[in-house]
Amino acid sequence: MSKKTKEELQALVDKATAGDKKALETLITEVQDLVFNLSLRMLGTFADAENATQDILLKMITHLSSFRGESAFTTWIFGIAANHLKNYKKHMFAHHPLSFEYYGEDIVNGNIQDLPDFTQNVEKDILAEELKMSCTNVMLQCLDPESRCIFILGTMFSLDSRMAGEILQLTPEAYRKRLSRIRKKMADFLSEYCGEYGGGKCKCKDRVNYAIQSHRLNPQQLNYTTAEEIPLQSMIEVKNAMEEIDNLSQDFSFCKPYQSPEHTKQLIQNFLNSTQLSIIQKSERK
């Protein structure tokens, strides 16, 4: 992911709107990891994030002519993605929302003792790492969609309050206050229950077989430990402003960014090579 100036991005948008396929591909490359990581944290699973990423990128492509340059291009993309994801109803947790109470109850009372070995000859350390990344990501589903979006934009992407407020239609002050409350709520939960990122007793390695038994972990489908990580700073450099509003950043180091899956990239590439794109671009230029 490179860092382009506002002017460079605007030039790419102008060229892409005029039908320049190479410029459009460059724009997609600039934002696809950003969109995927926001989708992953908002929806909780790789499969749902892939589907939503495709939807959002296609929406970007087909609405590109509506970008007027009144805000930064990345702010525009964040806005499209945030609105799409807050109202997304096709993901696993849409009809079965979680709560911190439920999560805490499961941690305290889940029967993790005397279970058979379900690891299917996969190293337990690998499965524990997969469970840690999955568990902390799914934990975000205990927040309502807007609170979840506020937390992700402020914690993972470090958006400043002006930009985030513009995306979420909140004043900068309201955004800062809500982000601070949400971050404290997350940090308190981790501190009470999580032995990996807080002072709790829950250890992922002890819960591997329990997680497999309850279908929360599949030894034959390890998404997090097989995904290619990208430096967090690369994600942050997508935008130019950063703002530290409290001292809780170290508590949320589980917010690791990943490259977009190849499957998603290929589907977008297929769309770029299709006649459907040409038809859409011609209709937008009329």
Image: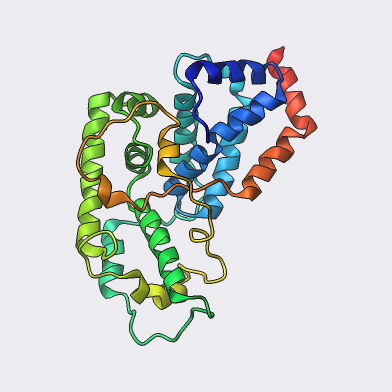
Residue 75: quadrant of the picture: top left
Residue shown at 32% from the left, 41% from the top = 155
Residue 100 to residue 154: above or below: below
Q: Is residue 97 visible?
A: no
Residue 126 to residue 286: above or below: below
- State the image coordinates of residue 232 (x, y, percent, origin top left): 41, 43
Residue 15 to residue 53: above or below: above
In what quadrant of the picture does the C terminus appear? top right
Q: Outermost residue, right direction?
A: 275
Q: How many marks?
A: 0
- State the image coordinates of residue 78 (x, y, percent, origin top left): 46, 31
Residue 86 to residue 102: above or below: above
Q: How is the image coloured?
A: rainbow
- State the image coordinates of residue 196 (x, y, percent, origin top left): 29, 63
- State the image coordinates of residue 80 (x, y, percent, origin top left): 49, 30
Residue shown at 53% from the left, 46% from the top = 259
Who is closer to the viewer here, 178 or 90?
Answer: 178
Who is closer to the viewer here, 192 or 145?
Answer: 192
Who is closer to the viewer here, 164 or 238?
Answer: 238
Q: Is residue 120 visible?
A: yes
Residue shown at 36% from the left, 57% from the top = 136
Is residue 187 left or right of 19 when viewed as pictured? left
Is residue 195 left or right of 73 when viewed as pictured? left
Residue shown at 54% from the left, 21% from the top = 9
